[in-house]
Amino acid sequence: MYAPPVQRLVTELGKLPGIGARTAQRLAFHLLRADDDEALALADAIREVTEKVGLCEVCFNLAEGPRCQLCEDPRRDTGLICVVEEPGDVIPIERTHEYRGRYHVLGGALSPIDGVEPEDLKLAQLYDRVTNGVREVILATNPTTTGEATALHVAAALHQRAPDVAVTRLASGLPVGGDLEYADEVTLGRAFTGRRAV
Ligand SMILES: [Zn+2]
């Protein structure tokens, strides 16, 4: 239907989450109409993150270099680890200004139905980290079925491996079934201060 390069662009845009065929087509035509500079700036930005941004070797947050900015920051409390599903979940928690510890990004949530098993997440790396003077692990996985299942699994494993480490879960009040990413900072801040032992 389109010239092959245009079709290729439509196909690639259509692979993005939340972008259907029609939106992919509209975005492609927008880029074709835009100044070359504008379109190429997008291409360059994509190339740059792909080449320069990887995962932090300690917490698996996004990092430019071997460690992320939060792991490099000496003011962050190393005795606290907040466990989240995705790198995108770190941002809303940082915005609450309620938390001064470190993070651990699992890279997803347990979901046997989708084939996500414990070994597919950064769980072993988390268990290794808690042996190093950690006082509390805060489970901030999403308030969804898979997020709750993941929190229960991690809590049980931590109680067994590191009985002296407190394990807490964010207080209820977050929209059930929602993503942390979309929670407003006041609600999320309250959920943080009201966290309870699990
Ligand atoms: Zn890090």
Image (spheres, rainbow, N blue to C red):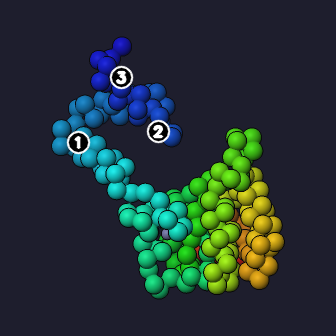
Indicate the secondary structure of the residue bearing disc 2. loop
- Which residue is found at the position 33% from the left and 47% from the top? 46
Badge 3 crowding class, 10 Å Cα cut-off, few under 14, some 14 to 19, many 20 or more, is some
Question: For the residue marked with disc 3, what is the amino acid?
Answer: Gln
Query: Which of the image's four quarters has the C terminus?
Result: bottom right
Residue 187 at least partly seen: no
The answer for how far apart the CA atoms under marks 2 and 3 are is 15 Å
Indicate the secondary structure of the residue bearing disc 3. helix
On the image, the x and y values in percent for residue 113 come to 74, 40
Indicate the secondary structure of the residue bearing disc 1. helix
Question: For the residue marked with disc 2, what is the amino acid?
Answer: Leu
Query: Is the CB atom of the residue marked by disc 2 within 8 angstroms of ligand 1's nearest atom?
Result: no
Front-most of residues 6 and 73: 73
On the image, the x and y values in percent for residue 191 come to 67, 72
Q: Which residue is mark 3?
A: 7
Image height of 151 relative to 137, above or below? above
On the image, the x and y values in percent for residue 134 come to 65, 81
Question: For the residue marked with disc 1, what is the amino acid?
Answer: Leu
- Pointers 2 and 1 in contact (C-beta within 8 Å): no
So how many labels did they put on this image? Answer: 3
- In terms of sequence position, does the residue under pointer 2 or pointer 3 come before the other? 3
The answer for how far apart the CA atoms under marks 2 and 1 are is 18 Å
The answer for how far apart the CA atoms under marks 1 and 3 are is 18 Å
Q: Which mark is residue 16?
A: 2
Q: Which mark is residue 40?
A: 1
Front-most of residues 93 and 51: 51
Badge 1 crowding class, 10 Å Cα cut-off, few under 14, some 14 to 19, many 20 or more, is few
